[in-house]
Amino acid sequence: MNKNFVHLHLHTEYSLLDGVGKIEEYIDKAKNMNMKAMAITDHGNMYGAIEFYKKAISRGIKPIIGIEAYVSEFEMDKREGRNFHLVLLAENNIGYKNLLKIASEGYLNGFYYRPRIDKEFLKKHSEGVIALSACMQGEISRGILDNESEEKIDSKIESYVEIFGKENFYIEIQGNGVEGQKELNESLIHFGKKHKLKIVATNDTHYVYEGDHTLQDLVICIQTGSKVNESNRMKIETHELFLKSKEEMLRSLGENALEYIEESEKIADRCNISLEFGQFKFPHYDIPSCSKSATEFLKKIVYKGLADRYEAGLSEELLKRVEYELDIIIKMGYEEYFIVVWDFIAYAKDKNIPIGPGRGSAAGSLVAYALKITDLDPIKYNLIFERFLNPERISMPDIDIDICQERRGELIEYVVEKYGADKVAQIITFGRMKARAAIRDVGRVLDVPLEKVNKVAKLIPAFATLEMALKEVAELREAYENDREVMNLINLSQRLENKVRHASVHAAGVVITKEPLTDVVPLYRDNKDKGVSTQYQMKELEDLGLLKMDFLGLRNLTNLQRTIDYIKETKEKEIKLENISLD
């Protein structure tokens, strides 16, 4: 039984360079080992925090949100010095908010090879945070390994105690099979006792099962562009970074380490955060003084829009339909959503930024048509409102906005100006290793002949998984059964298939928040400086109740606008697309 052991040092596939295991695989194994809590501590980021939190709770495991931060040797603005690892865990909701700020700062202002922070920033954001001295790459461990003087190491320990307080800073020892770790543990225990600090035993966990070090090695080779058989390449010289049971930890560290192993449970008991899902947090829109509330203002602009749309007058059918829709929108609390969307669409049309006529289920809303968010008359075309908003199914309304590709940036700039640069960001997305790409990457790393790799890759149908391809493609199945090299290639590729490979910015997604972004989400900026995006993906942002919009840049709209401009220039005719008959 593992009721007295908690994993505090877990790297998931979102540790892009070296984490292999998927979140659900870790949770399943922890559940099978009767563990009561786990902590996610990916390197320098919080990409997987919400997914981990929700999946752990669904399986009855207490989630602890953390990060293994990179602490710069000097101030962040200096482009020099080493980065030291430091494990940070959120003790409470204040600590979680501070982790959001720490994770954001590393990318926005401290990035230099790694998302770094310095001790000054840590001190300002240490409330509610528990810190562990980390692995061999922690500052204290590095000092010991570099044979620094006892006074110098004392000074480093004192600097962390000053930041976090004695009760919140733990000396961390590990049983990871790395050469020199046992001797390092003895020194760490000596310093822990000398400074009257608590000591906790952890295992730096980068993959789920014993034996998965081969997968981690493949991932490192893929990410660094090297091959398995190269001698001078980045390599982790241990096979013990798997999710260990209490018994396996005792074997690694010895029976004398029992109290340090059980300290992990005391830390887990201290960590209690509660995240709120499904409560909508729309950005603040300044309602004009002529209206007392968002509800009153929405009704006002809807009826004004209806009068513009239906110049012949409003029939009973129209009035009944618009009141029905407004009733549902108000009951579900979406008034502000429609006002925010109406506002930036109105701006775009005022500035002649081409906007699409509407797509998807939003075209079924008479309110959206009245607000000129869409240009299709749902009454004329018999479109159903319930496909868009259904009181039986509480979910955020989703209106995709098509924008002229060349002028998309102008609309985003308007939104930034309206709500504040600290409340608008683009959204992250993750590239995953699909079946063919996995075969090609693994084949290159294993030095399988290129001709063979290409043949296998080409046998996999587009969008098929390797499991599906083996069932459906007889030639592939035959190669798998009769060629050991192909069998090994496919087996390893299957384990890495759909693994997160890289982070990038979503082509359309933009999030607008009520509070400053770093109070609600961690932020990311890639080294190509494509602007600020969230570290949480669209699904997680929706779960947190944040307003997410798809601003889809379309070349078609650019071409249509150019055509209209050319006609005006050469034929002196003003063309309006909405006035052209559909037939």
Image: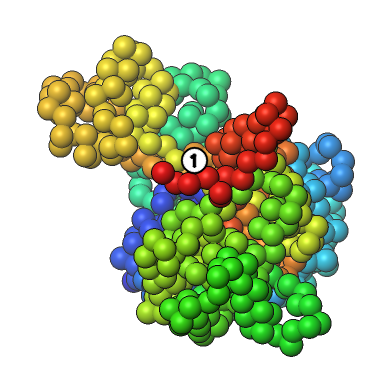
Residue situated furthest bottom in the rendering: 292
Along the viewing direction, whichever of 72 and 482 lies nearer the viewer: 482
Residue 171 at x, y percent in the picture: 66, 62
Q: What crowding class fits label 1: few (fewer than 14 Cα within 10 Å), some (14-19), or many (20 or more)?
A: few
Q: Residue at the spot x=57%, y=45% of the render?
A: 577
The number of discs equals: 1
Residue 483 at x, y percent in the picture: 18, 21
Image quadrant in which you'd find residue 212: top left
Along the viewing direction, whichever of 150 and 304 lies nearer the viewer: 304
Quadrant where the C terminus sits is top left
Q: Residue at the spot x=67%, y=62% of the render?
A: 512
Q: Residue at the spot x=18%, y=26% of the render?
A: 476
Along the viewing direction, whichever of 248 and 217 lies nearer the viewer: 217
Residue situated furthest front in the rendering: 312
Could you say whether the residue bearing mark 1 is in a helix, strand or loop? strand
Quadrant where the N terminus sits is bottom left
Q: Tag 1: residue type?
A: Gly
Q: Is residue 142 left or right of residue 62?
A: right
Using the rendered image of the protein, determine whether residue 424 is visible from the camera's viewpoint.
Answer: yes
Residue that badge 1 annotates: 431
Rendered image coloring scheme: rainbow
Q: Residue at the spot x=66%, y=84% of the render?
A: 296
Asked if residue 418 is positioned above or below residue 216 in the image, the reply reads below
Using the rendered image of the protein, determine whether residue 90 is visible from the camera's viewpoint.
Answer: no
Along the viewing direction, whichever of 260 and 347 lies nearer the viewer: 347
Residue 61 at x, y percent in the picture: 42, 72
Asked if residue 502 is positioned above or below residue 249 in the image, the reply reads above
Residue 530 at x, y percent in the picture: 70, 40
Asked if residue 366 is positioned above or below residue 353 in the image, the reply reads below
